């Protein structure tokens, strides 16, 4: 690629072209410069002083490597939070830590309202799913392609006491999403990209969780399917009262959807506000929304 074409490369997470290329490292450096000193009082304000998912002073990572440093988080019941930031900032590590995929060096993660919150910091992923109602919706390609749509849903209920309970929950999903019901006997590999993502979301619903951890819901999807997926998530939040914590590469789409937005830099919280506040923040727009 010549220098002229190279200068047409897009920066940030949004659309549009810019006059100069900006590297991931440079995004992180510039984001660090605009980082704010976020108090716990500010985080509490964003959830109306009524958090449902709470993280206090979390230090976590993989093996002996610490990725998150003294990280705090608040999300209210039925609220949505979108995590944005440069690659390597620790966004997915937050989801992994909540679900039990990381080493927790210190700090605490709780689920539930004040006075009834459950400490889930050291629970296993299975315990978090079955006992605390936390479900993780992985990035693309987590379905079982050789299984039918119906069998994939049954797999979502693998922690149910009896197979019949999983099948009953699957039927509730089919009632809700006729598009899947029409393909219940089809192998999952023949589904469209949007249908596969719908199946991934629906499989997580079989265990009837209260918290959904959603990792890159738009990744690999055509624009028409992206809109469909966000409509499904919006319905789960506002009709069913699900609490949603999301990592989304399309920062504009994620912040338009979410009640709250966090910007992460180098494993720490740099900026926090409502989704609309971050969308209107000029510096956030320059770095993550394409100008």
Image (spheres, rainbow, N blue to C red):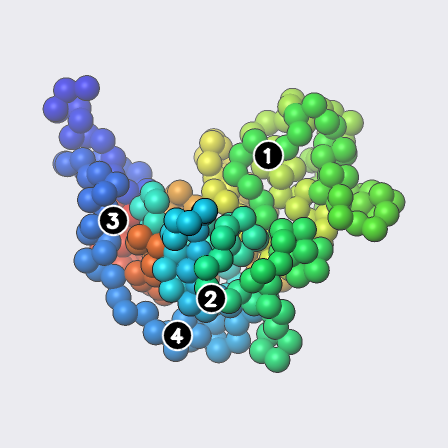
Q: Are marks 1 and 2 in contact (CB under 8 Å)?
A: no
**Can residue 261 be seen here?**
no
The residue identified by callout 4 is: 40
Left or right: 95 as drawn, with respect to 42: right
The residue identified by callout 1 is: 142
Between marks 1 and 3, how big is the CA–CA gap?
Answer: 30 Å
Q: Quadrant of residue 18?
A: top left
The nearer-to-camera label among 1 and 2 is 2
Seen from the viewer's position, the closer of residues 10 and 51 is 51
Sequence-wise, the earlier of marks 2 and 4 is 4
Q: Which mark identifies residue 107? A: 2
Task: Give the total number of marks visible in the rendering.
Answer: 4
Q: Position of residue 11 (x, y in %)?
A: 25, 39
Between marks 3 and 4, how big is the CA–CA gap?
Answer: 23 Å
Q: Are marks 4 and 1 in contact (CB under 8 Å)?
A: no
Q: Residue furthest front?
A: 64
The residue identified by callout 3 is: 28
């Amino acid at each position: 690629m010549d220098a002229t074409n190279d200068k047409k490369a897009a920066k940030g997470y949004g659309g549009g072209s810019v006059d100069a290329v900006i590297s991931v490292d440079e995004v992180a450096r510039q984001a660090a410069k605009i980082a704010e000193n976020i108090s716990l009082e500010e985080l509490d304000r964003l959830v109306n002083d009524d958090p449902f998912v709470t993280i206090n002073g979390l230090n976590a990572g993989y093996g002996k490597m610490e990725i998150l440093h003294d990280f705090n988080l608040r999300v209210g019941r039925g609220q949505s939070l979108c995590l944005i930031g440069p690659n390597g900032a620790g966004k997915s590590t937050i989801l992994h830590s909540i679900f039990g995929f990381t080493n927790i060096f210190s700090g605490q993660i709780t689920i539930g309202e004040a006075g009834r919150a459950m400490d889930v910091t050291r629970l296993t992923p299975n315990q978090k799913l079955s006992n605390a109602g936390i479900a993780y919706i992985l990035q693309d390609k987590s379905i079982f392609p050789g299984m039918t749509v119906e069998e994939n849903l049954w797999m979502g209920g693998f922690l149910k006491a009896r197979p019949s309970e999983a099948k009953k929950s699957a039927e509730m999903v089919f009632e809700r999403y006729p598009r899947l019901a029409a393909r219940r006997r089809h192998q999952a590999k023949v589904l469209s990209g949007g249908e596969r993502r719908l199946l991934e979301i629906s499989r997580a619903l079989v265990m009837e969780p209260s918290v959904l951890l959603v990792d890159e819901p738009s990744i690999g999807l055509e624009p028409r399917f992206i809109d469909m997926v966000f409509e499904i998530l919006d319905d789960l939040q506002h009709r069913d009262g699900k609490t949603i914590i999301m990592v989304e590469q399309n920062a504009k789409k994620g912040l338009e959807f979410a009640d709250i937005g966090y910007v992460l830099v180098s494993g720490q919280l740099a900026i926090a506000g409502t989704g609309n506040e971050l969308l209107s923040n000029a510096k956030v727009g320059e770095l993550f929304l394409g100008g």
